[in-house]
Image (cartoon, helix red, strand yellow):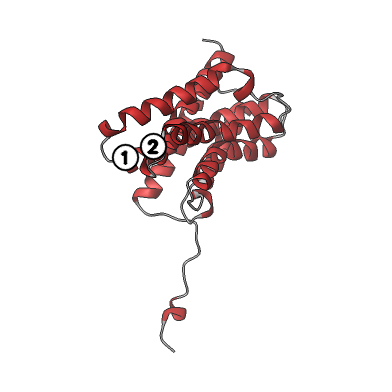
Amino acid sequence: MSATAALLFADLLGVAVFAASGASAAVVKRLDLFGVCFVGFVAALGGGIVRDLVVNQAPPLAFDDWRYAVVAALTAVAVFFFHPHLARLRRVVVVLDAAGLALFTVTGTLVALRAGVPPVGACLLGMIAAIGGGVARDLLLGEIPIVLRREIYAVAALAGAVLVMALHRAGLTGWPMVGAGVLVFAIRLVALRRNWNAAPRPDERHDLPA
């Protein structure tokens, strides 16, 4: 498989994962079929659209390549009809979101680097591509975006983007890039399980009665 084909496959896999995440979250909110598909579509393609616009890919792949929209729509429809078989749907949403974060961090950073974006900008763009869909999903569902909460989310994506950039500059591709995605996925899930956050510790003196 060529590098271009591998990147396309990873990108479409990320679309499917984030579409499932968005659709699952929409099902929890009891949206109808159109609502579930729309949220899944936006969650899957929002970050990629921003990425493509920044690197002057016009029109964005989400509109230029029919496979992106079809993968997102079919995934969302499948989640809508088969969600009763998904046990503990909220946990499924979290795991899928972490997987999508990992995949889009890797593909977003690689696309930026191949478009000639300098290393620092490529890392930032990789992070934006990874978190953009999740932000749009949360806003559509009336939730505070995860990236604005105390949870380790954007930090995990940025760490993965830095690793992708370093591996790319070292000429390491293939499985090392998979390892970068696994790192993002692991950081996100471990942070959730251990309740890690990036917020400052509260001053206990402020909690004492006057």
Given the image, on which type of amino acid does mark 1 rest?
A: Leu
- Name the residue tied to disc 1: 89
Q: Position of residue 6 (x, y in %)?
A: 52, 16
Q: Residues within 10 Å of mark 1 (few under 14, many from 20)?
A: some
Q: Position of residue 59 (x, y in %)?
A: 69, 23
Q: Looking at the figure, which quarter contains the C terminus?
A: bottom left
- Above or below: residue 7 compared with residue 153: above
Which residue: 68% across, 35% down? Answer: 119
Looking at the image, can residue 13 be seen?
no
Q: Closest to the observer: 48 or 6?
A: 48
Q: Position of residue 82 (x, y in %)?
A: 31, 28
Q: Closest to the observer: 34 or 176?
A: 34
- Above or below: residue 151 compared with residue 81: below
Residue farthest toward the top in the current orientation of the protein: 1
Which residue: 45% across, 80% down? Answer: 205
Residue 24 circle label: 2
Which residue: 48% across, 51% down? Answer: 143
Q: Closest to the observer: 178 or 13?
A: 13
For residue 127, side relative to residue 87 (left or right): right
Identify the mark nearer the N-term, 1 or 2.
2
Q: Helix or strand or loop: what does disc 1 sit on?
A: helix
Is there a contact, CB below 8 Å, between mark 1 and mark 2? Answer: yes
Report, in whole angstroms, how far the alpha carbon at label 1 lies from the one at label 2.
7 Å
Given the image, on which type of amino acid does mark 2 rest?
A: Ser
For residue 159, side relative to residue 120 (left or right): left
Q: Helix or strand or loop: what does disc 2 sit on?
A: helix
Q: Closest to the observer: 76 or 98?
A: 76
